Image: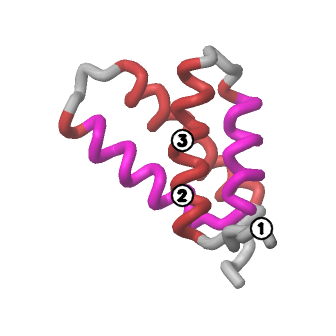
Amino acid sequence: MAVVEQWNADVGWRLTFQHAFDVVFCQGEEREGVAELLALSRHCRDALDEARATCAAIVAEWPHDADARQALHILEAAVSRGDESGCWRPFP
């Protein structure tokens, strides 16, 4: 029997954090990446906030890391789009 990891805000922030960097490394389009981040977070703002805070800490420690700065920008754009569209769902 396979063990399936239940989605929660902890899993969500890790997925969104990693995907923000995937978008940067693959030179993906920001607009597409933002939509993907909202979907991966399951429209849970807490997951994106945690990913954004973690990425901001990396940028604070290594301010010249262009990839981290771009990933942070994409995460901030996802939070902003979620705020504008009112798409946030409460975490179950």
Q: Is residue 23 left or right of residue 60?
A: right
Quadrant in the rendering for residue 74: top right
Residue range (magenta): 31-59
Q: Nearer the viewer, mark 1 or mark 2?
A: 1
Residue extending furthest left? 61
Which of the numbered marks, if any, corresponds to residue 13? 2
Examine the residues drawn in magenta and state their main secondary structure.
helix
User: Amino acid type of disc 2?
Assistant: Trp
Residue assigned mark 1: 2
Q: Quadrant of the N terminus?
A: bottom right
Which picture quadrant has residue 60?
A: top left
Q: Residues within 10 Å of mark 2 (few under 14, many from 20)?
A: many
Residue 92 in the image, given as x and y percentages of width and height: 71, 84
Locate residue 24, reporting x and y percent. 55, 23
**15 with respect to 4 (left or right):** left
Q: Residue furthest bottom?
A: 92
The residues bearing labels 3 and 2 have C-alpha atoms spaced at a distance of 8 Å
**Residue 51 part of the magenta segment:** yes
Residue at disc 3, secondary structure: helix
- Could you give the CA–CA distance between mark 1 and mark 3, rounded to whole angstroms? 24 Å
Q: Amino acid at mark 1?
A: Ala
Residue named by callout 3:
18
Q: Which residue shows up at 29% across the image and 35% down it?
A: 59
